[in-house]
Image (tube, grey):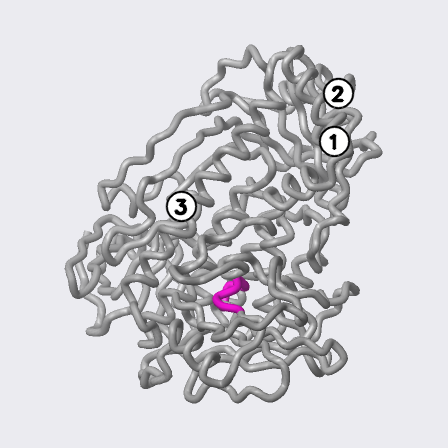
Amino acid sequence: MTDAVEPPGVRDVVVIGAGPTGLLLAGDLAAAGLAVTLVERRPHTAPRLTRAFAVHARTLELLDARGLADELVATGRRIDRVRPFDGMALSLQRLPSRYPFVLITPQYETEKLLERRALSTGVDIRYDCELIGLRQDRDGVTLDLRTPAPTPARVTTLHARHVVGADGVRSTVRRALGLPFPGRSVVRSMVLADVRLTDPPTDALTASGTPEAFAFLVPFGDGWYRAIGWRRDGRAADTDPVDLDELRAIARTAFGTDHGMHDARWISRFHSDERQVPHYRRGRVFLAGDAAHVHSPAGGLGMNTGLQDAANLSWKLAAVLNGRAPDPEALLDSYQRERHPVGRLVLRLSGALVRAVTASGTARHTAGRLAAAVLPRLDAAQDRALGLVSGLAIAYPPPPGARRPAGRRAPDLALAGGRRLYGALRAGGFVLVTPPGPPTPPGAPLTHLHWPADRLRTDCVLVRPDGYVAWSAPRATGADLAAAAAAWLLPAPRPHRPDAPPSDTPPSDASPSDRRPSDGPPSDAPRPDAPRPDAPPAQKA
């Protein structure tokens, strides 16, 4: 083994792990003009096995803000109705989103789009490269990386201002930080495979169970189906051999038929854990995705939660490293404050779902009957359940001194000139929406747009780069807008370094989606006829 030190220079950010979370994060940071290296232990030619397959509405909105959603939608199948229990169906069409469905597509399709974007923004991606050491001090982080070729293996040293560990459940970054990963295994010996069927079910998404077994089938839309099976008396270890006959037997027990399963392109055995690291940040190092939290596959929440971690963290790191954050430490600390409770909620939600479907026959049947009787009759309960699973109802605590809707998701607002909010977010920065008239806050690095002329709205909204409301007021003067912007943004731009990759040109706002942007305000936003307070204060971060 030989040692080498790379040429002098410090990366702004090194991201460990080139799964969906790491790819989105690295692409965002490079698009903001930062020098980013992405390290992945697997060779680029390694098979891309698909564990995740569901892309929920909120994740599609975040991809829409990067110009990627419609292309990804074209790779899969839309599911707009789910049957969590026999005799019960929930329509996703009631979701208040441009994407009122679950997209079923292999994880590698998501990774392919995100990798292409990362490369286009200038990310230095290093496959077949393993992190073996990490040290940090007040000035930065030092990383030791090992590559197997050319023979002998070589160890190189990199220096970075910040590091993000998005390297999965067995995270090397998390272990290097000495952080615990408390939790437990909740389901053992599940069988997972991609198969073809000679006799496909009529429902797009099929799930059923008996006191002895549970099985799940969902189509990718290209002739392949994701199949998951679990038997209550299963005791096999993850490393024990598994074949298609075992999965067929589970399906026959759960469904009464195996739907003619054949030609498994891959099959594996796994167990499901519920774990969460207590701290998402340690000094200059952050954790995201499965490195920070892992839970059951129920609800298809894992990849979605990781991508939303990345979207939350990327703009904060970019603001700090580009010198535009009024309080850098507070902004970086807000990643833990906002995302750790979401991870805890997802653990509870996915845990409840998996316990419901794997409960004993009597308990599962009783839970299903209650849900089927109650949820369809209570619109608010349906909306809450669908909002949590889709991610649309996820909200963050409002900043000190702020009021709702600050911290809540901003819908895809209709704007003047036929534009829409998530198209405007493709520029990668804050978006300020006001009625015509108020001036743009001087020197503020944001996009200032207006309500459509026929809406007669007086309210003002400042939206964060991740599509959450930063500030709002029923009316605002130029001074109010300047104060609101100053609470989040410093006007002085960071000098461009010659070695930094150029920012990507924001794509057009146009989208082929056939759904119109929302005409309404963010949830709980003041209406135009709201009474004007004597002095509407700007809300501070």
Q: Answer with mark 1 or mark 2, whichever residue precedes in sequence.
A: 1
Is residue 467 left or right of 39 when viewed as pictured?
Answer: right
Provide the residue designation for mark 1.
206
Of 289 and 61, nearer the camera is 61
Q: Eyeballing the image, is 525 above or below 354?
A: below
Q: Answer with mark 2 or mark 3, whichever residue precedes in sequence.
A: 2
Q: Residue at x 44, y 29 (%)?
A: 273
Per the model, the C-alpha gap separating discs 1 and 2 is 9 Å
- The C terminus lies in quadrant: bottom left
Is residue 310 left or right of 88 when viewed as pictured?
Answer: left
Provide the residue designation for mark 2.
255
Query: Element at badge 3?
Result: helix
Q: Give the range drawn in magenta.
A: 465-472
Q: As shown in the figure, which amino acid type bears the numbered disc 2?
A: Phe
Provide the residue designation for mark 3.
340
Q: Do the residues labelled 1 and 2 touch (CB within 8 Å)?
A: yes
Q: Does the magenta stretch include residue 469?
A: yes
Q: Is residue 429 visible?
A: no
In the image, which is nearer the foreground, mark 2 or mark 3? 3
